[in-house]
């Protein structure tokens, strides 16, 4: 039965492909001369067709035979020394061809269903599932299982086709098998099968849909019944879940979201001849075009597929997949749900030594539990190209100028050079070192112009930004010294001394008012060396910075508690404490270049205070463990913060209090960050021995974000005692950068 069903299925597929809208030409074919005579034998006009594995051909009405076929076959015979078909004697071109009953005697009749089976396709033509149009220009149609060519059956012209259409009563039900070129006459059962498929009915008919009921249990009352439990409640109460589901579907039908399928009228009489019926077509890709609302009501979510086995599941895995004794012991101590592998990889020399899987039944049971107990949910995945997520940055060559080459090395210090500062015109450079000296250098030549003995280690220094004054503030242990280096224009140097000496002390202050800083005027040898003022602090001072106008400077005392930040006025020689309470361990301070704002950086936060209103304006979240340095953009709307955990955070004050961008290019702690006054550049110095220069363009358009692009990594300093580059600063007018390091050198990159 299965054999016949498989054979019918093949003919039905061939028949349905050739059905057209015209009922008279439902099963029309192009040109096929294969048929059967009344006696059931086929007439072959050429013995070479016997090579075609027993396929019958109709008698051809034309007497012409292509010479190409015979020539090609003769070449094959000459090459092989025999004919293509086994058991078939070679034949000369001039040999006469038997016909009629003589041909039937020579060619045995074979069953065309001989090679059919219920689980495999037709093996007479082994070309596979390919377009048969590829053999259109060839004399053969494929190859059999032995590799021999299958010669195409002869075809007649249009006149023969018309005569067959008129004379043959079974012409309308004859189809052509594309794989073999055979003509097959469909039986009544095949036609019924096609009609049932077109009408969306059971292909085999409704007679075999329901099998006869077999009463395994009798309806008579038994003394000892098989099951004596009472009927369950769910057996006679409607299901609530089905009620909800049906209610949803009814509501969808009412709203027009779901349309029920059209049921054909059962009272309609079936017509005997299929050519009079209108063909019905079905879209087999209907599920893909189904609206989302209908899919949601169906709620069919396929089960997730199991992951494919890897190398560790092999019976002879590589050595790197095998667990060591420590790893195996650790695997045994873990909970089953915490284990990365559900089994221990083992190695066997051959497959026959592999035992059965001990956890097979348990694993299958857990898989079944997952399939019907675990809830499923559809998640929409976005197919995004990872390259599209990366912003398209300009090339570094397009962002020039920026420093690229080490040009000058300033040598002379004998210890760690902790701080540097450039004169506002860019002609002179000041540096402070642990050898208790401050050296003044000429930038262009690298010559040391003056050396000042400070008596204590220099922790920080800053050149006055006012070009009309020639002053440098130097931080020692507990004091800040204001020095006149005496370099540059002599008129500016003399005017600076005049401004410092023109101070007149005010009247005595009210009693009880605490003065946090003591101001002293330097005299004698200190005055001759260039010292002008000394400000003594109660605690150690770590940092000093000037206001843009050059009259105010701020100092940082990390251990000063409420006096951690002090602001000093040079012209009036007074100091004030802007804060009454300590907000944390202060690291750096900076003045806003335009507005009366003060930036105070603690270990994890940067607070922005309005000095006029005396209130907190913003609190920036650095997302760092320990802030080491801070710099304010010349425009005042952007701030960069460096930290000891190798992070550089860029803040846009108009955008958010969180970092706009975080750079992690350094491998060790960042010691200093700085902005260029004119060019869109900023740099960061780190203990990994590198100085990274980045392009940071800030636009006037508030809708356009800043452009941050790393352009150059500068190296040259030698790491000494775990420290490398400690300070960096840009040239005020040129795209140059200075750096000082623990190797007692200062380097200029241009």
Image (spheres, grey):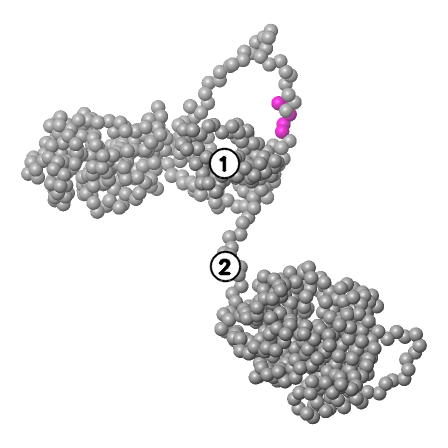
Disc marking residue 345: 1
673 or 294: nearer the viewer: 673
State yes or no: residue 238 in magenta.
yes
Disc marking residue 387: 2
257 or 621: nearer the viewer: 621
Q: Which picture quadrant has residue 450?
A: bottom right
Q: CA distance from mark 2 to mark 1?
A: 38 Å
**Which residue sits at x=59%, y=38%?**
330
Q: Is residue 300 above or below residue 555?
A: above
The x, y position of residue 677, in whole percent, is 63, 78
The x, y position of residue 561, in whole percent, is 81, 66
171 or 425: nearer the viewer: 425
Q: Which picture quadrant has residue 198?
A: top left
Residue segment shown in magenta: 235-239
**Which residue sits at x=62%, y=29%?**
239
Can residue 658 be seen here? The reply is: no
The x, y position of residue 381, in whole percent, is 54, 49
309 or 648: nearer the viewer: 648
**If you read the primary sequence from the N terminus, does the residue marked by circle 2 or circle 1 appear first?**
1
């Amino acid at each position: 039965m299965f054999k016949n069903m498989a054979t019918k299925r093949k003919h039905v597929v061939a028949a349905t492909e050739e059905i057209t809208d015209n009922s008279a030409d439902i099963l029309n074919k192009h040109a096929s001369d294969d048929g059967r005579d009344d006696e059931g034998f086929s007439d072959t006009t050429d013995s070479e067709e016997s090579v075609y594995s027993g396929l019958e051909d109709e008698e051809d009405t034309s007497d012409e035979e292509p010479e190409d076929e015979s020539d090609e076959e003769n070449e094959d015979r000459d090459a092989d020394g025999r004919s293509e078909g086994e058991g078939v004697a070679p034949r000369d071109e001039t040999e006469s061809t038997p016909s009629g009953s003589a041909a039937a005697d020579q060619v045995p009749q074979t069953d065309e269903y001989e090679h059919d089976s219920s689980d495999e396709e037709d093996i007479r033509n082994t070309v596979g599932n390919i377009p048969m149009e590829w053999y259109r220009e060839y004399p053969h149609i494929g190859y059999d299982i032995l590799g021999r060519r299958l010669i195409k059956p002869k075809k007649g012209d249009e006149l023969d086709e018309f005569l067959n259409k008129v004379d043959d009563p079974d012409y309308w039900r004859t189809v052509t098998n594309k794989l073999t070129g055979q003509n097959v006459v469909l039986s009544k059962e095949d036609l019924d099968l096609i009609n049932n498929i077109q009408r969306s009915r059971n292909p085999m008919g409704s007679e075999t849909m329901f099998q006869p009921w077999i009463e395994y249990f009798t309806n008579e009352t038994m003394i000892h019944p098989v099951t004596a439990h009472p009927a369950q409640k769910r057996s006679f109460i409607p299901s609530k879940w089905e009620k909800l589901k049906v209610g949803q579907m009814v509501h969808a039908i009412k709203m027009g979201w779901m349309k029920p399928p059209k049921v054909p009228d059962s009272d309609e009489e079936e017509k005997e001849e299929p050519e009079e019926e209108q063909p019905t077509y079905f879209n087999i890709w209907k599920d893909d075009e189904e609206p989302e609302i209908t899919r949601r009501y169906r709620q069919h979510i396929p089960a997730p597929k199991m992951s494919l086995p890897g190398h560790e599941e092999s019976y002879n895995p590589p050595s790197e997949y095998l667990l060591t004794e420590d790893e195996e012991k650790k695997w045994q101590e873990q909970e089953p749900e915490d284990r990365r592998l559900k089994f221990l990889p083992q190695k066997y020399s051959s497959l026959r030594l592999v035992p059965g899987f001990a956890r097979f039944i348990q694993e299958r049971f857990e898989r079944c539990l997952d399939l019907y107990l675990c809830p499923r949910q559809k998640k929409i995945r976005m197919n995004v190209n990872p390259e599209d997520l990366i912003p398209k940055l300009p090339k570094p060559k397009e962002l020039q100028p920026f420093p690229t080459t080490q040009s000058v090395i300033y040598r002379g210090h004998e210890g760690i050079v902790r701080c540097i500062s450039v004169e506002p015109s860019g002609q002179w450079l000041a540096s402070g070192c642990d050898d208790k000296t401050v050296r003044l250098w000429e930038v262009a030549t690298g010559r040391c112009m003056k050396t000042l003995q400070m008596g204590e280690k220099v922790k920080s220094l800053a050149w006055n930004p006012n070009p009309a004054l020639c002053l440098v503030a130097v931080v020692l242990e507990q004091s800040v010294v204001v020095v006149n280096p005496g370099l540059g224009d002599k008129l500016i140097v003399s005017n600076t001394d005049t401004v410092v000496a023109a101070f007149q002390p005010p009247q005595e202050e009210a009693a009880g008012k605490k003065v946090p800083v003591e101001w002293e005027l330097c005299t004698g040898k200190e005055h001759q060396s260039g010292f002008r003022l000394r400000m003594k602090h109660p605690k150690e001072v770590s940092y000093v910075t000037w206001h843009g106008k050059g009259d105010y400077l701020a100092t940082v005392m990390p251990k000063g508690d409420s006096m951690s930040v002090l602001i000093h006025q040079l012209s009036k020689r007074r100091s004030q404490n802007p804060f009454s309470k300590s907000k944390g361990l202060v690291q750096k301070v900076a003045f806003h270049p335009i507005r009366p704002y003060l930036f105070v950086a603690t270990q994890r936060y940067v607070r922005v205070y309005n000095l006029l209103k005396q209130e907190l304006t913003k609190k920036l979240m650095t997302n760092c463990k320990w802030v080491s340095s801070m710099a304010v953009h010349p425009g005042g709307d952007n701030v960069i913060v460096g930290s000891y955990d190798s992070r550089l955070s860029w803040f846009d004050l108009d955008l958010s209090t969180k970092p706009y961008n975080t750079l992690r290019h350094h491998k060790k702690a960042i010691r200093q960050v700085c902005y260029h006054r004119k060019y869109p550049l900023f740099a960061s110095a780190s203990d990994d021995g590198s100085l990274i220069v980045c392009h940071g363009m800030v636009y006037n358009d508030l809708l356009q974000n800043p452009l941050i692009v790393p352009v150059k990594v500068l190296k040259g300093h030698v790491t000494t005692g775990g420290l490398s580059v400690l300070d960096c600063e840009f040239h005020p007018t040129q795209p140059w950068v200075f750096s000082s390091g623990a190797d007692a050198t200062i380097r200029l990159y241009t």
